[in-house]
Amino acid sequence: MILLSRRSQLAIAAVVDVALHARPTPVAAKALAARHNLPPRHLETLLQALVKAGILKGVRGPRGGYELAKERRRITAGEIVRAAMADGAEDADPAPDSKLVEQVIHPLVEKAGRHFLAELDAVSVDDLCRESGEKGVFEDMTTGADFTI
């Protein structure tokens, strides 16, 4: 089960890629796209969303590209995902085809999916019914018969 959009997964992969490759010069979008087997201009809107969110910094010029805007220990995967989702682009991105996604990002997403499902498994319909009653979710509706067993 994939809980994150391909765009979100690609955003995480792009930031990790930049963190790994931006020394001593910034990472060009073309090089980044090549490492993930994507069309060169494909990443541009995603990278700009990450710049806007303060995760990446764009460097102009012949040796320009992207580098981290802050220390990598201060950037979370959740922050990256929120930035990728915030720009409103649809998830029509092609699936990234790279070792980074396959060996690092995908296992992380799978682990998160298991934790997500474990949280959902810990909540019963009864728990949800009780909480909705406590919060008065249906107070404005007339109450019908109670079929509690």
Image (cartoon, helix red, strand yellow):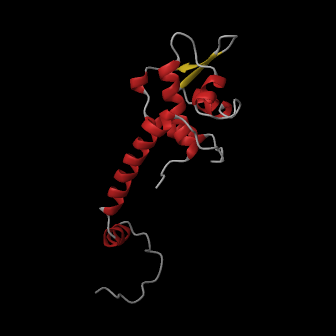
The image quadrant of residue 43 is: top right
Q: Is residue 136 above or below residue 95?
A: below
The image quadrant of residue 10 is: top right
Q: How many marks?
A: 0
Question: Residue at coordinates 47% horizontally, 36% vertically from top-left?
Answer: 79
Q: Is residue 141 above or below residue 45?
A: below
Residue 39 placed where, x, y %? 69, 34
51 lies left or right of 135: right
Question: Residue at coordinates 48% horizontally, 33% vertically from top-left?
Answer: 100
Along the line of sight, which residue is nearer the eye, 106 or 122?
A: 106
Residue 139 placed where, x, y %? 43, 74
The C terminus - image quarter? bottom left
Q: Is residue 138 above or below residue 76?
A: below
Question: Residue at coordinates 39% horizontally, 90% vertically from top-left?
Answer: 145
Q: Is residue 78 visible?
A: no
Q: Is residue 128 visible?
A: yes
